Image (cartoon, rainbow, N blue to C red):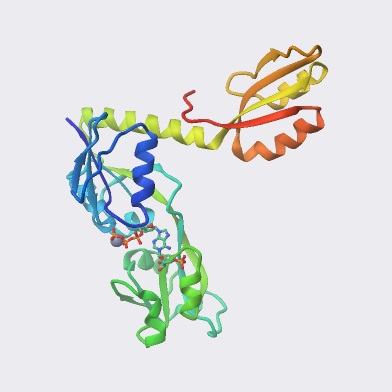
């Protein structure tokens, strides 16, 4: 029995979803426009769908799991489980008003008409903030609604913000931040659950590898205790003697976000010849 995964057929999520599966070691044959294809080296069937349909397909069990934006998950209100945040297709969902409009806070929206393709997410937010506004649901091109006079404001996805600016709008409230999620049907069978766990294990190894770097450096022996204290590594750093008397080579793994700060400290301690090497997979 295969695990069935729904991913976006084309659009902003497609490339990163396919890339994630590939980095997890899964070979996906060129689908040549097919909507269904099978991985050649993992029991995985891929369904290529419109992102809007993914929550429903997963809730109904047509797909076991899916990769979709948090915005769609919240909007569709389907009974699905979030199994992992994936960190790509990041964007925000924001309220925007015409740029010359005076705006002093959420009370602005009382009695106003807001155009959006995400009426449920907007409704949840307005209710939580006790704002009485009219939600004008439209399928697309939300950003032109104020210009053509069909709404006073909009609620939409924003990434760089340039679409808002070129339509004479100003982002005034960030309602939520969204990223791609891996979601699953809450009632997976035992085999499906097992395959999902195997897939998640691989995704985790890819994620750890991407957020860590392998560091190699040369250090004077008298500074080794201080240097090792700064570089905990996975267990502890590997230290090898250099041919040059009094020096050693130190190898370890460091999280990328601490990377620059540590490089500076290491240099101050006399470290030289520092090499930073990407890691392909990391399993601890
Ligand atoms: O055909 P299908 O229905 O599958 O795709 P789609 O057209 O509905 O979705 P798509 O591919 O555009 O987006 C898929 C997902 O990517 C969204 O559901 C979000 O989770 C995420 N995402 C990330 C974005 C953006 N960034 C984004 N910038 N989705 C849409 N946009 C829009 C934005 O609304 C604006 O109109 O892109 C435009 C450019 O944004 P700015 O702010 O950079 O100008
Ligand atoms: Zn869509």
- Left or right: where 13 falls relative to 58: right
What residue lies at 29% left-to-right and 74% top-to-bottom? 138
Task: Name the residue nearer the viewer: 67 or 22.
Answer: 22
Task: Name the residue nearer the viewer: 39 or 95.
Answer: 39
Split into quadrants, the picture shows ligand 2 in the one at bottom left
Task: Name the residue nearer the viewer: 172 or 140.
Answer: 140
What residue lies at 57% left-to-right and 78% top-to-bottom? 104
- Left or right: where 150 falls relative to 234: left
Count of numbered circles in the view: 0
- Can you tell which quarter of the image residue 21 is in? top left
- Given the current orientation, which residue lies at the most extreme bottom position? 149
Find residue 108 and report its horizontal and vertical position in percent. Answer: 49, 80
Find residue 74 and report its horizontal and vertical position in percent. Answer: 34, 56
- Left or right: where 48 falls relative to 225: left
What residue lies at 23% left-to-right and 56% top-to-bottom? 53
What residue lies at 30% left-to-right and 34% top-to-bottom? 27
- Compared with 117, 200 (above or below) is above
Find residue 51 and report its horizontal and vertical position in percent. Answer: 28, 56
- Left or right: where 235 falls relative to 39: right
Q: Work out which quarter of the rendered image holds the N terminus and state it.
A: top left
Find residue 18 and report its horizontal and vertical position in percent. Answer: 34, 44
């Amino acid at each position: 029995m295969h695990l069935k995964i729904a991913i976006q057929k084309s659009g902003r999520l497609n490339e990163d979803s396919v890339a994630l599966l590939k980095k997890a070691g899964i070979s996906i044959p060129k689908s040549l426009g097919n909507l269904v294809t099978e991985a050649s080296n993992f029991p995985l069937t891929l369904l290529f769908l419109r992102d809007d349909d993914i929550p429903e397909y997963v809730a109904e069990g047509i797909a076991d799991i899916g990769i979709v934006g948090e915005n769609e998950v919240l909007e569709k209100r389907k009974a699905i489980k979030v199994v992992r945040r994936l960190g790509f297709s990041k964007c925000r969902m924001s309220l925007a008003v015409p740029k010359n409009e005076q705006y002093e806070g959420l009370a602005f929206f009382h009695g106003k008409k807001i155009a959006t393709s995400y009426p449920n997410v907007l409704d949840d937010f307005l209710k939580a903030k006790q704002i009485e506004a009219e939600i004008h649901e439209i399928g697309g091109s939300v950003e032109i609604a104020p210009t053509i006079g069909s709404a006073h404001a909009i609620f939409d996805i924003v990434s760089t913000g340039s679409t808002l600016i070129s339509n004479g709008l100003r982002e005034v409230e960030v309602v939520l931040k969204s990223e791609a999620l891996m979601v699953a049907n809450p009632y997976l069978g035992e085999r499906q659950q097992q395959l999902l766990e195997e897939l998640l294990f691989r995704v985790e190894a890819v994620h750890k590898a991407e957020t860590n770097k392998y560091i190699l450096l040369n250090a004077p022996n008298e500074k080794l205790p201080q240097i090792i204290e700064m570089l905990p590594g996975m267990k502890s750093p590997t230290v090898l003697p250099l041919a040059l008397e009094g020096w050693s080579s130190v190898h370890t793994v460091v999280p990328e976000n601490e990377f620059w700060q540590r490089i500076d400290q290491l240099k101050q301690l006399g470290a030289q010849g520092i090499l930073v090497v990407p890691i392909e997979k990391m399993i601890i």
